[in-house]
Image (cartoon, rainbow, N blue to C red):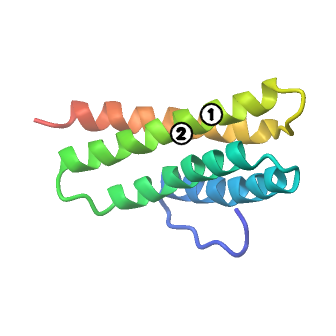
């Protein structure tokens, strides 16, 4: 983790925050390359992952928590889509490590959803 970042002790909160910081850097690279549309779409979905994870930490109920984590998972899927477009397009830059990071986040979110659903009466 970056020394500027406080660790929360919560793996998904920390990973999604770090990913958002990395996404900002990549979005700025896309902007410099004049790839504005995908750059903005990517930045919105990539930073939304962590925002929804953080919001889930203060959920009003288990159902609300699951709902917010599901939204984060959807945003992670959308983010993966934008990264795959960049990877598959010859005219776009790509950062393979971002794909790796978002895949780890997706797995954790899916595990949280599955575990939370199994614990809901």
Q: Residues within 10 Å of mark 1 (few under 14, many from 20)?
A: many
x 41%, y 54%: residue? 52
x 46%, y 58%: residue? 51
The residue under label 2 is 76
x 83%, y 37%: residue? 94
Q: Is residue 30 above or below residue 21?
A: above
Instruction: Tell me if 9 is positioned left or right of 6 in this view.
Output: left
Query: Relative to the observer, which residue lies in front, 43 or 111?
Result: 43
x 37%, y 44%: residue? 69
Query: Relative to the observer, which residue lies in front, 117 or 20?
Result: 20
Which quarter of the rendered picture does the C terminus lie within? top left
Q: Residue furthest top?
A: 88
| Quadrant housing residue 66 | top left
Callout 1–callout 2 Cβ contact below 8 Å: yes
x then y, percent, for residue 37: 69, 45
x then y, percent, for residue 29: 84, 54
Q: CA distance from mark 1 to mark 2?
A: 6 Å
The residue under label 1 is 80
x then y, percent, for residue 48: 50, 53
Q: Is residue 4 above or below residue 43?
A: below
Q: Is residue 121 above or below residue 44?
A: above
Query: Relative to the observer, which residue lies in front, 37 or 86?
Result: 37
């Amino acid at each position: 983790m970056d020394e500027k970042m406080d660790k929360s002790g919560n793996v998904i909160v920390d990973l999604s925050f770090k990913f958002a910081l990395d996404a900002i850097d990549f979005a700025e690279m896309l902007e410099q390359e004049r790839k504005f549309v995908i750059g903005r779409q990517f930045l919105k979905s990539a930073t939304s992952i962590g925002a929804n994870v953080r919001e889930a930490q203060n959920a009003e109920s288990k159902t609300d928590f699951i709902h917010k984590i599901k939204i984060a998972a959807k945003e992670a899927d959308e983010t993966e889509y934008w990264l795959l477009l960049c990877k598959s397009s010859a005219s776009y830059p790509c950062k393979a490590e971002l794909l790796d990071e978002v895949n780890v986040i997706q797995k954790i979110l899916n595990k949280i959803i599955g575990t939370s659903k199994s614990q809901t009466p």
